[in-house]
Image (cartoon, grey):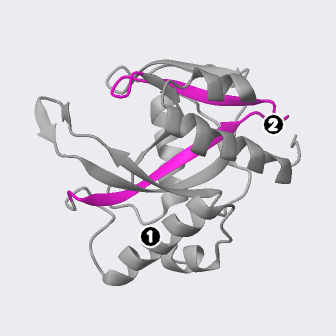
Amino acid sequence: MTLLEELEGYLPWNEQEARDREELLRRLRSGEDLYTRANAAGHLTASAWVVSPDRRQVLMAYHNLYDSWSWLGGHADGDRDLLAAAMREVREESGLAEVRPVSPAIYSVEILTVDGHEKRGAYVSSHLHLNVTYLLEADPAEPVRCKPDENSRVGWFGLEEAVAASTEPWFRERIYKKLNEKLAGFPAGR
């Protein structure tokens, strides 16, 4: 199934998701290249809300660029399988060897603003991350490590602690709280 087909079948959770889904669909239907960073105005990213099997903890990384605790994820970089991209990013950013989808379906959608910034000595203009989020699961007993060029710490938090740890108000109030609320539809696993 293509991303366009997945998004067409996706049932938005709230008004933010409904509006962002419509814009994602519009851009995908336009034919513009969204899968690579060659599109400097906006491109696809894949994020993960990584939870423990008992659904009581979430994995966060202290993101160097944003100077805040945040979810894990990154650019599609040409990969049309955004679930695979999200899992790759989680492994790269956390060192986790074992991470699995709670469901292969899209968990959440967001359009995220990224302010202009320096990366590896070059200026990156302000742009949009057209983001798709997946719900993943991992064992909190498994060792984690940071990825120094992206984050300085990685750790497990209680659900409410994860929201409070973020210093980005929009993420705290609009995104992370929503992701936690949606967890009620996914009972504890193994």
Position in image of residue 170 (x %, y %): 51, 39
Mark sitting on residue 45: none
Q: Does residue 126 lie above or below 146 as drawn?
A: below
The residue wearing badge 1 is 24
User: Of circles 1 and 2, which is in front?
Assistant: 1
On screen, residue 185 versus residue 37, left or right, reads right
Q: Residue furthest left?
A: 122
For the point 73% across and 20% down, the residue is: 141
Give the residue type that dot 1 points to: Leu
10 Å crowding of disc 1: few (<14), some (14-19), many (20+): many
The one of 176 and 92 positioned closer to us in this rendering: 176
Q: Does residue 58 lie above or below 130 as drawn?
A: above
Give the residue type that dot 2 points to: Arg
Position in image of residue 99 (x %, y %): 64, 40
Rendered image quadrant of residue 8:
bottom right
**What is the magenta range?**
40-67
The residue wearing badge 2 is 55
Answer with mark 1 or mark 2, whichever residue precedes in sequence. Answer: 1
Q: Does residue 129 lie above or below 20 as drawn?
A: above
